[in-house]
Each structure stands twice: as structure tokens, then as C-alpha cells.
Amino acid sequence: MSDLPVLNTSDPAYAHDPYAVLAPIAEAGPVVRTMVDGLAVWLVTGYDEAVEALSSPRMSIDGIKNSGPEAREVFWAGAADRGLQSHMGRMDPPDHTRLRGLVQQTFTPRRVAALEPWIRGIVRERIEAFPSGDAEVDLMAAFALPVPIAVIAELLGIDVAQRSDFRHWADTILQASEQQEQVAAAAEAARRIMEMFAALVAQRRAAVGEVSLDISHEGTLIDGLIRAHDDGDALNERELLSLLFLLLGAGYETTANLIGNGMLTLLSDPARLAAVQADPTLLPVAIEEFLRLDPPVKVVFPRYPLADVELGGALIRAGEPVLVHFSAVSRDERRFNDPSVYRPGRGADRSEPSHLTFGYGLHHCLGAPLARLEARIAFDELLRTYPDIELVGPVEKLRREHSRLFRGLSALPVRLGERA
Ligand code: HEM
């Protein structure tokens, strides 16, 4: 029996309050070898150590090539179809540079800002679909989930009817454990997703005339990627399908959880809510604090040292998995004052650093400007339309999704109040 600390991600206590579960591990040190779901992993809970792990050129993100003989793939079930893993999120330079370069320009804050009126339209559409009068709704199902999936699916030109299938398949892949049954289900889900994307690519190839690699709400992003593939060797077919999977997979549940967790943070304290209602220009800083206080993504792909390294006082052998835990990092007491307290505007005086919830370094979230914009519009429209919105029932009764990766609510029941 190993005497390493244990983290069991299916433990209900972890889903409910990962901060409490992680605290003793963080106390033991910023980088601690931990049994996570039965696998030995270097768990990074310290802020500075996370920055180093995420940005060091000595750390590879390519677990297929660089995980040591002992290390099985941790998270993102290794045995599930590897075809879908041929994306930049699992690649080191120079392949990462090549693939990220293809889409980077389309996600700049300026390009994304131009989508504001269109995203506002999607958000308004969801709000208009709420039941009339002072009704009770589940904000996750009726708002937080449908908005981001509509945005990313439309950017990619995916049919409305296929979105729920995609969500189901992506969940099956992302949540799969090493258990044989789940691995088989994940492989089947991956096959279905590949088929869906291959059909989509074929359909757009047939329909498309003039295309440009641009971001707009007419699916021109996918057309541009197809052109990049067809015109030369910028990306191969498998990389094209994997990139679509990455964008769709990374683009919805993350942002849905930001909206859900953020609304919960506001609704659980009338003073917080009143502050942003009185001055909606405070929303951007409030959103940064939602991201720090309750990160929508708990962990990302592990890193694997290319040679033995020292990190936070730990000696890590080449190929051993290193897992940055964003929930712990964002509560690092060495970098944040009273980290469990909601305090928007932290760091304005530079006494505290920015959160790391969008990652750091080469793989820093490509969709961060889009996620921030969607969240700002979502909070703005919802709070302006329903100034008296409130939680139904006590916060303690709310259930969290069981997920290794994401931190979100199963449901967020609210009473809308009268429309403004
Ligand atoms: C990467 C978080 C929304 C696309 C990442 C990473 C994090 C993250 C932590 C770094 C992964 C790593 O270092 O291994 C989030 C959060 C979001 C969000 C918290 C919402 C609140 C989005 C959206 C998109 C997106 C809306 C859609 C376009 C990506 C992509 C990468 C990425 C493509 C990989 C970048 C690379 O490997 O170079 N995200 N994300 N994300 N994210 Fe996001």
C-alpha cells in the first residue's frame, strides 16, 4: 500500500467542495505526489509552481510520446480513440505552433469583440424563451449551457439538431475512466464524433465557394480551416477533425460553468448582486474574480518532464505525469490574500497576481476572449431583464456535476421575478 495522499475524483465530497478536499494536500507542499484515481501523479497546487509547469520548455504536453513507461495516460482516457487527440492541445512545438497559428488570428480580442451584437442576439433569444411571468427556471439548462453551445456550434457551422448528440459523446469521452466498459464507450463516441465532423467537412466542401479564414457567425471558420487543409500541407485530415473536436469540446461546458458558477456567486449574496446591478461596468472585474474563486476547469492535460526536473522542491523523473490543479492554485495563500473570499478587483494594485484559470504559456486558452465576452453579455442581459432574480432554496442543496475536469452545477434553480 502506498502512503501517498489520495484524491478520488468520484468522491461526492470532492464534487461538492474540492477546495476543502485539496487543502491538506496543498498544506503538504506546492507539488505533492498524490494517488489520483489510483494513479501516481505530481499534483501542483502552488501558483508559482503552476506557472513553471505550464510554461517550461522542459515539460511536454504530449503524453502519447513522452509519458514514462510507468505512467499511463491520466485523464482523457488514453485508450479512447487517439484520432481525436491529434490537436494542438496535446502537441508541443513545432506542431503546436503550426496548428495554433492557423486559428490564433481568428480569436484575437478585436475579432472576437466584433461578434458582440451577434452573441447578444443569441443571449436575448434564450431569455425570450423563458416562461413568462415570475417563473422558476433552471438557469443551467435554460441559459448557461445553451448559450455557449449555440455560439461555438454556429461558429463551426454545426447543425442545431446535432448539438445534443455532440454534448453526449464529448462527455462520454472526457469523463471516461480506465474501466474497460467506459473506454469502449468512449471509443465508440469518438468514432461517432469523427463521423459527424467528416460529414460536416464534406458538406461544407461541396457548398463552399469563396472562403476566408475568418471568424464570423456563418461558419467561415470551418471553411477557412478546410481551405488550409485543401490548399497545402498546413494541416492533415485527422488534424482538421481533431481541431474541430477541440474547439467544440473546449468551447461550451467551460463557458457554461463560468456563467453558472458566476451567477451562483452573485445570487448567494445580495450585496454582490446589487453592486454589479448598480454598475454593470464592474462586470468584467467580477468575471475575473468568478474565474479565480471557482474555476470552471479543475484540471487540464498533464505535463511530462522531458528529463528529470526539480519543481517546488520535488524531484520529478522524466515522463512522470504532472497535473496542475486550478482549483487549488487559485486559492494559494502565498499569492492571494484571503483566497476563499470574493473580492473583485484584486490585483488592481498589483499586490496579487492574475488568476491562472485560462492556463499560462504556449497553451494559454485560445478562447479566453470569447468566453469573457459571452459571460459579460450573459450576465448583463440576464440581470438587466430580471433585476429581482433570486435563488430558489438554500445554496447547500445545490448539486455539483461529478466531473474530473469541470466544475459546474447540475442545476441552478432561480425565481426570475418580474421583468424590468
Ligand atoms: C486551452 C480554460 C473557454 C478553446 C485552455 C486551457 C485552459 C482553458 C486552462 C489551457 C490548457 C493547457 O494548458 O493544457 C478555459 C476556460 C474557459 C475556456 C476556463 C471558459 C471559461 C474556451 C472557449 C474556447 C476555448 C470558449 C473556444 C474556442 C481552447 C483551446 C485551447 C484552450 C483551443 C488549447 C490551446 C492550446 O493548446 O494552444 N482553455 N477555456 N476555451 N482553450 Fe479554453
Image: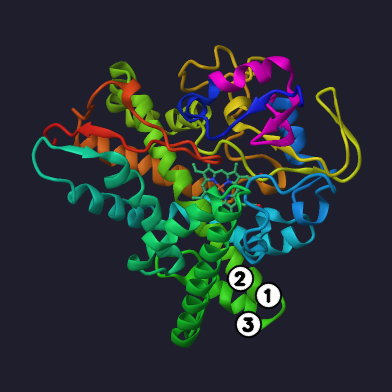
| Residue found at the very far top of the displayed protein | 338
CB atoms of marks 2 and 1 within 8 Å: yes
Above/below status of 314 relative to 383: above
Residue 119 highlighted magenta (yes or no): no
Q: Secondary structure at mark 3?
A: helix
Residue at 54% x, 18% y: name it. Answer: 20
Above/below status of 367 relative to 396: below
- Type of residue at label 2? Leu
| Residue that badge 2 annotates | 240
- State which quadrant residue 114 falls in: bottom left
Q: Secondary structure at mark 1?
A: loop
Total marks shown come to 3
| Residue found at the very far left of the displayed protein | 133
| Residue that badge 3 annotates | 230
Residue 122: x %, y % from top left: 30, 55
Q: In 3D space, how far apart are the residues under numbered discs 2 and 1 (Cα atoms)?
A: 6 Å
- Type of residue at label 1? Asn
Q: In 3D space, how far apart are the residues under numbered discs 3 and 1 (Cα atoms)?
A: 9 Å
Q: Of the two numbered discs 3 and 2 on the same chain, state the one appearing first in sequence.
A: 3
| Residue that badge 1 annotates | 236
Residue at 18% x, 51% y: name it. Answer: 129
Compared across the picture, whether 78 is left or right of 141 comes to right
Q: Is residue 166 visible?
A: yes
Q: Which residues are magenta?
A: 20-46
Above/below status of 74 relative to 81: above
